[in-house]
Amino acid sequence: MELTKVRNRFHQMIDEVENQDMLLMFFELFKWRVSEPDSGLWKSLTPKEKAALVKAYKESETEANLVSEVVVKRKYSKWLKP
């Protein structure tokens, strides 16, 4: 997709968001990525790892895909102990 179309679609999507918390979250993420495009952990990830993170994030938007903190702590308790 060409840059102009991406920008136009991005603006359209922003205009369609009614959830202020979600919009602020994306704003902070976008602001961080613009100010620090090639730094930190993101830079150290492979394209496959980046794609997996993006996919996981998109899946997390569906509540049925979420796992409670209690379940996660129970499942990974051996790694959480000091």
Image: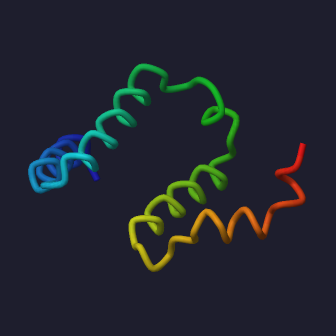
In this rendered view, identify the residue nearer to me: 64 or 40: 64
Identify the residue at the far top of this view: 35
When the figure is inspected, residue 52 is found, relative to residue 7, above or below; the finding is below
When the figure is inspected, residue 66 is found, relative to residue 10, above or below; the finding is below
Report the label total.
0
At x 33% / y 42%, what residue is drawn?
25
At x 50% / y 76%, what residue is drawn?
65
In this rendered view, identify the residue nearer to me: 5 or 60: 60
Give the colour scheme of this rendering: rainbow
At x 59% / y 23%, what residue is drawn?
39
Q: Quadrant of residue 26?
A: top left
Q: Quadrant of residue 74?
A: bottom right
- Horizontal and vertical percent for residue 5? 18, 49
In this rendered view, identify the residue nearer to me: 12 or 20: 20
**Image quarter hosting the C terminus:** top right
- Horizontal and vertical percent for residue 55? 51, 63
- Horizontal and vertical percent for residue 36? 48, 22
Asked whether, in this view, residue 17 is left or right of residue 34, the answer is left
When the figure is inspected, residue 46 is found, relative to residue 38, above or below; the finding is below
In this rendered view, identify the residue nearer to me: 80 or 13: 80
At x 69% / y 46%, what residue is drawn?
46
